[in-house]
Amino acid sequence: MTEAADAEAKTDNLIVEREDGVLTVTFNRPEARNAMTWDMYMGLAEACETADGDDSIRVMVLRGAGGKAFVAGTDIAQFVEFDGPAGVAYEKRISEVLARLRAVNVPVIAAIDGYCVGGGLGIAACADVRIASPRARFGVPIARTLGNCLSGDTLSLLIELLGRARVVDMLLRARFIESDEALTAGFVGLVTEDIAEATAEWANTLKGHAPLTMWSVKEVVRRLSDAGGSVDDEDIVERIYGSQDFHSAVHAFIDKTPYEWRGR
């Protein structure tokens, strides 16, 4: 971010900034590989509210500070006093935050440099598109570390994006996949050394596209994923075809004149 960026919120562990239509959330605990605290999870949910509450925001970007990790899971120190009911409450709470991230109205880009582990992999999976550096590594090695489990919601999403066989193999063998395998699997759309430049280019492209069209893609995909099959999309179709953007863009296309999307 430049010095001209408008800082929406800044804490030691989470930085939320907006600049030129892009809301950037930086996970900022490089000394702990950006492992998530409860406050960071809540800050992420609040950033989603910010993105949806400001029509000038067209794209949301998630990134990790320090270059060694996107997010390396949840801070393990928070698990010390856990028992069964606490584990249920934890997984429910995390599922609610991830569900909120998936439901953000604007496209979400995850810029993944370094480790993307556990809860970090869940966060990345909730983004709409993902860019990775060659150093990115993805995994949930809990079978050899903490001995905990994933919620059904998170596991289902990972299976949808990475494939059942690969996810089961990753979990049972507690293995990581490298950026090239993530690219082959379709989990990431690009692997590049210059992740910052690529993220800026993708964000700039998305800012130029119709906000409601992109929202409709996100929303139908989310509903399909949650329902596991066909969904009722009548409200989505009605909103799009009844929008000012659609009607104005049709006339602009016919007249061969430019149109600036308004998102309504």
Image (cartoon, grey):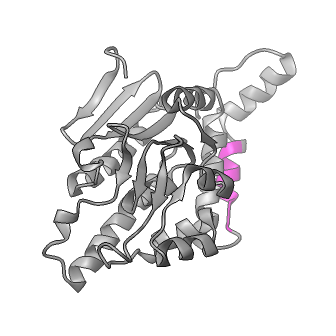
User: What secondary structure is the stretch in magenta mostly built from?
Assistant: helix
Q: Which residue lies furthest to the bottom in this view?
A: 84
Residue 55 image point, x, y percent? 47, 32
Q: Please name the residue shown 33% across and 37% down the image.
A: 65
Say above or below: 23 vs 213. Answer: above
Q: Please name the residue shown 29% across and 26% down the image.
A: 7
Residue 113 image point, x, y percent? 45, 42
**Which segment did they paint magenta?**
231-240
Report which quarter residue 227 is drawn in: bottom right
Of residues 66 and 108, the one drawn nearer to the viewer in this rendering = 66
Specify the quadrant that holds the C terminus.
top right
Does residue 102 appear in this view?
no
Is residue 243 left or right of 85 when viewed as pictured? Answer: right
Magenta-span inclusion, residue 106 = no
Q: Please name the residue shown 28% across and 36% down the image.
A: 15
Does residue 40 appear in this view?
yes
